[in-house]
Each structure stands twice: as C-alpha cells, then as structure tokens.
Image (cartoon, rainbow, N blue to C red):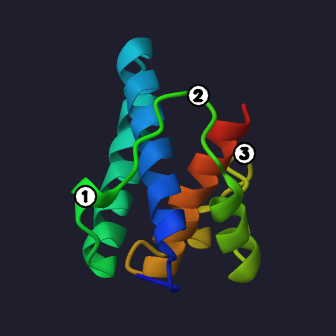
Amino acid sequence: MGYYKKPEYIYCIFNVCKKINEKAKNSNSRRLQAISKVILNYAYAILRESKIDIKEIPIYEDENINMQPFFEYIHTNKIQFIDFKNVQNTDLDISNDLDIERFVLSHIYYITQA
C-alpha cells in the first residue's frame, strides 16, 4: 500500500490508532468510532505489508507519542492532507490505495493536532 514504511512509522501509527480508539470509545461518538475503524484497518494493512509481528510493536502508555516518524513519512512522500471542509466527491478514488492512505493520514493529522 503506497510507499515504503519504516518500522518507527508503523509503531507510531499503531500507538496513535490505540489512542484514537480509546478516545472514540470514551466519547461515544459514532463518527470518531468509524474513523477509528478506518485507521485501524490501515494500521493492520501496513503491518501485514511490512511483515512485522504485532507483538514487536512498542506500546507507549503515556499521552506523548513521538509523531516525528509520521511527519517524516508525510514530508518524504509529499502527501497533501485533505481539507475535509472543502472535499468533493471527485477528490478521492476509493479504489486507489494512495487516496485511501491520504484520507487516513489526514484524519490522523487533524485528530492529533486538535
């Protein structure tokens, strides 16, 4: 799915996913729960793609997740976040892995920066 992903990036995504999932459960927000599931599906897809055992992923128990691998990945691959306030139906192709990845990463960015 898309570009090469360093293990540190995958670890970051899984830890962010864990925090967003906890936040979704605590908020009872159906929207956030749906977004959380999309992010979780992405996380499992990149885990399968990289052949990393889930048991190898270090889990960060504190709130401070190192987002540097996330931003390096965004910068290196020149990924443009989606502006969800102005997104059009034609802006995303759900059959395109890169569009799905951009959709997921945009959500991660907006949720973690809030």
Q: In this view, does 110 lie above or below 81?
A: above
Q: Quadrant of the C terminus?
A: top right
Residue bearing the label numbered 2 = 63
Question: Can residue 18 be seen by looking at this rendering?
Answer: yes
State the image coordinates of residue 43 (x, y, percent, origin top left): 37, 59
Of mark 2 and mark 3, the one earlier in the sequence is 2
Res 90 → quadrant: bottom right
Q: Is residue 101 above or below residue 26?
A: below
Residue bearing the label numbered 1 = 54
At 51% across and 76% down in the image, what residue appears? Answer: 6
Q: Is residue 31 above or below residue 4?
A: above
Q: Which amino acid does label 2 sit on?
A: Glu
State the image coordinates of residue 19 (x, y, percent, origin top left): 46, 33
Q: What residue type is labelled 3?
A: Lys
Q: Distance between the residues labelled 3 and 1?
A: 35 Å
At 71% across and 70% down in the image, what residue appears? Answer: 72
Question: Can residue 82 be seen by looking at this rendering?
Answer: no
Q: Distance between the residues labelled 2 and 3?
A: 28 Å
